[in-house]
Amino acid sequence: MKKILCVAAATLSLGLAGCSITHSVAVSDISGKGKPVSAKASTFNFLQLIPMSMDKSAQVASELNSQCQDKGVNGITTKTSSTNLLIGVLEKVEAKGYCNP
């Protein structure tokens, strides 16, 4: 009986260690004029109950603009990804752009 429990525990731990799936979206590079800037944000969504809020996207956009001393940003590309874990999802958003001259 003890041997069966050890085998079951080992199988379960290996199974749980492999329960990660990553989804991502790639974007093409857009060249722009000015200094390149980037910003990112992430959040952990426990049991997939509450998805990433738009506040995170607004936070990334605000951070890009602040890196350009509020002159504005052009050529913005974004990348979002989500990693499914056993107890939830790790969601990330990343943006890159160029400061207006």
Image: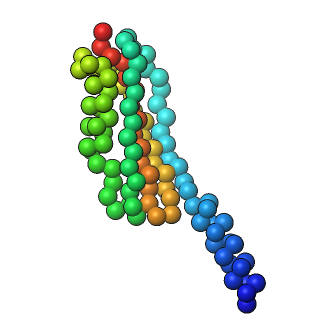
Residue 12, relative to residue 31: is it above or below?
A: below
Q: Is residue 60 left or right of residue 27?
A: left
Quarter-of-image position of residue 72: top left
Q: Which of the 4 quarters of the picture holds residue 6?
A: bottom right
Q: Position of residue 86 (x, y in %)?
A: 51, 63
Q: Position of residue 98 (x, y in %)?
A: 36, 18
Q: Could you say which quadrant of the image residue 17 lies in?
A: bottom right
**Above or below 99: residue 59:** below
Instruction: From the viewer's side, name the closer residue of 22 and 55.
Output: 55
**How is colour applied across the structure in the image?**
rainbow
Residue extending furthest toward the left: 70
Which residue does the image show at 44% across and 60% down from the upper left?
Answer: 88
| Whole-percent x, y for residue 51 in the image | 33, 54
The quadrant of the picture occupied by the N terminus is: bottom right
Most extreme residue toward the right is 3
Quarter that holds the C terminus: top left
Residue found 48% across the figure and 26% down from its top: 28
The residue located at (44%, 56%) in the rendering is: 89
Number of marks in picture: 0
Task: Give percent across and percent down for residue 97.
Answer: 37, 23
Q: Check the image and report above or below for 43 versus 65.
A: below
